[in-house]
Amino acid sequence: VAVDCIVFGYDIQKKILKLLLIKRNFEPAKGSWSLAGGFVKEKESLDEAAVRILRKLTGNGTIFLSQSHTYGETDRDTGARVISTAYYALIANRDIDHELVKDNGAHWRSVTGLPGLIFDHSVMVKKALADLQYQIKVKPVGFELLPEKFTLVQLQELYEAIYLIKVDKRNFRKKILSM
């Protein structure tokens, strides 16, 4: 049983949603792009495993984290039979230990220009992005990706980066004020 973490970040200058990926340093698929993940330890819950993996990768285990979906297709991993629960995390640039990220071989990539990912990780990313797009309709979870103080314009730009479309300014402000 494994956990895979889809780590979203936001580049406020470039106004793009990013995904933290790693280059695998072990087989199968050594050298390929992958989500951060690992096996659940014997006395560890799924949530605890996800927090452990995120802490090891970013230095921070207290970020927004939400379970997305469980993947159990029999042929999803070429190395062995693996059932994986995917989590998505939202982490602001200020909340990351950049040296640790670098030491782990992790890299930020735009969600609109992702390289090929191993196994079913592309499916996991699409599902997690859809989950995030739904969540920001009903909860202000996107605030996790912004600085402590931000403008309404910056919030709209974040929403546009998550939805991957332009949003009408008046309708957006009306929606946010109603929340």
Image (spheres, rainbow, N blue to C red):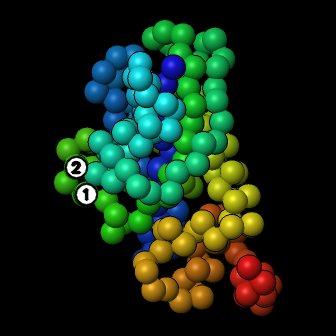
Residue found 49% across the figure and 86% down from its top = 150
View extreme (front): residue:
43
Res 169 quadrant in image = bottom right
Image height of 79 relative to 11, above or below: above
**Is residue 152 or residue 42 the one in the foreground?**
42
Q: Is residue 45 visible?
A: yes
- Give the amino acid at mark 2: Leu
- Residue pointed to by mark 2: 100
How packed mark 1 is, by other alpha carbons closer than 10 Å (few <14, some 14-19, many 20 or more), is some
CA gap, disc 1 to disc 2?
5 Å
Q: Are marks 1 and 2 in contact (CB under 8 Å)?
A: yes
**Where is 179 relative to 161, above or below?**
below
The residue nearer to you, when weighing 50 against 119, is: 50
Numbered marks: total: 2
Left or right, residue 151 beside residue 52: right
Dot 1: element: loop
Circle 2 packing at 10 Å, graded few (<14), some (14-19), many (20+), is: some
In the image: residue 128, left or right of residue 107: right
The amino acid sitting under disc 1 is Asp
For label 2, the SS is helix
**Residue 154: x percent and y percent?**
54, 83
Residue situated in front as seen by the camera: 152 or 34: 152
Res 143 quadrant in image: bottom right
Instruction: Look at 50% across and 38% down and name the residue there.
Output: 47
The dot on residue 40 is none
